[in-house]
Amino acid sequence: MDWKVEETEGQRTARLSAAAEGRDLAPGERMERIFAQPMSFADIKEKSDRYLVNNVKRAPVAFYFGQGEYLYDTENKRYLDFLSGVAVTCLGHGDADFIEAMREQSDRVVHTSNLVYNQELALFAEALVSYSFPGRVFVCNSGTEANEAAFKVARLHGQKKGNANLIVTLEGSFHGRTVAGMCMTAQAKIHQGFGPLLDHFHYIRPNDIEMLEKEMDQHGSEMCALVLELVQGEGGVRPLDAEYVKAARQLCDENDVLLILDEIQTGMGRTGKLFAYEHFDIVPDAMTLAKGLGNGFPIGAVVIREDRADLIHPGVHGTTFGGNHLGARVAYETLKIIVTRDILDNVNALSDYFLRRLKGMQLNLKCITDVRGMGLHIGVELDRPGAAVVDRCRELGLLVNCTAETTIRIVPPLNLPLESAAEGLDILEKVFQELK
Ligand SMILES: Cc1ncc(COP(=O)(O)O)c(C=O)c1O
């Protein structure tokens, strides 16, 4: 897909005029212009605690400005962002081309409806298919919604196959918070408190080919889909074995079961390939995307392989906002930037650097029991809960998070410079050294 040909004369002219108006400000100038009068942290906290539902435990910080791999809080303290809003802002903050695309599109038209055609959506779908596999795209607003759509594709396939409603997913998986997302998620804590959920879900051990064979042997005829994360993110940054993924593809083919990949966290270059399935030499029947897809703009998508795409026909699924002009344009621009700026080379080079340095730390520090990951999706397993490490890193100006209780998750922007990787790793090393 040739992006230059894709760009219309009008778009190019708009870009040039934006640059001439000084929209492509240098990072420092941008900060000076934007950093006006943030609210005090105390006020933000007070209002949040008073008016927001109490569904998450928030760290005591609020960010006001971002540039590249850095965030600045309301007191202008600088933080190196190795969290990227949980693997979302894949291009960091304040990318000039990204901002310009958002501005230009907001100026022109933000939303019409899915009752009419839409240039940005058509171009985005074409681009996504060109860079993944021949298929068709459904665009929505979040990861869990993408999985909800994939659930429908799975069940529609099951009905065609003959009342085959069973969906199998892996222990430790996380697929979202809607009803279907929760049911796909094999973590009991996510199900708790909601009474009976949907029937016909089984959870099996990751990387256990024998168990998968047995499941297919016993239940293959009732099964419509196997749903996998190729690297379990919320489950502790745990990549699947190549043999397991190959076996899964083969068993799905033999049993007429859809292989659905949840690439919500692994997609858009996070693992060093544009999509993680490319590491495994397989093609899924459907793939769900979100997180990095819009570089912070809320958007999700399902790519459905061409030979399965007619499972979706008018009336079976829909969305009001999904794929509107602004969302589609932003996702189109994000994809374009990832594939035209050698970002994947940077991910791979930095991945080696991170893994080498972290494994070096593991040799010297007892508190680290494992270092794993793919690309810039890295987990450091500790011999204790990781919450204190996250807090101490934040004090020292580094943002990471902890998943599955004991795994420090590192998901920096994909265009992170090497010097900033070194800066963040120095902080992490200091914090690990402080652990008794
Ligand atoms: C693998 C995976 N699937 C689904 C989701 C749900 O996405 P969202 O939070 O956008 O609904 C997440 C979110 O963390 C995820 O990591």
Image (cartoon, rainbow, N blue to C red):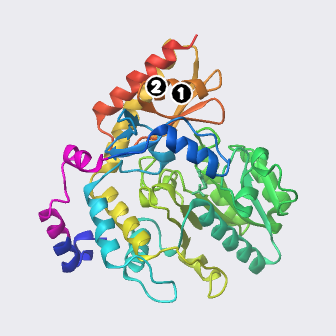
Residue 309, percent from left and from top: 58, 78
Residue 381, percent from left and from top: 59, 27
Determine the residue positioned at 41% across, 47% down: 272
- Left or right, residue 125 beside residue 234: left
Say which of 61 and 38 sits in front.
38
Q: Which residue is mark 1?
A: 391
Residue 242 seen in the figure = no
Determine the residue positioned at 65% across, 41% down: 235
Q: Residue furthest top?
A: 436
Residue 256, percent from left and from top: 71, 70
Residue 150, percent from left and from top: 64, 68
The image quarter containing residue 389 is top right
- Asked if the residue under mark 1 is in contact with the one under mark 2, i.e. CB atoms within 8 Å, the reply is yes
Q: Which residues are magenta?
A: 15-36
The image quarter containing residue 334 is bottom left
Q: Secondary structure at mark 2?
A: helix
Q: Which residue is mark 2?
A: 395
- Left or right, residue 174 beside residue 15: right
Q: Secondary structure at mark 1?
A: helix
The type of residue carrying mark 1 is: Asp
Residue 20 seen in the figure = yes
The type of residue carrying mark 2 is: Glu
Query: Is 372 placed above or below 99 here?
Result: above
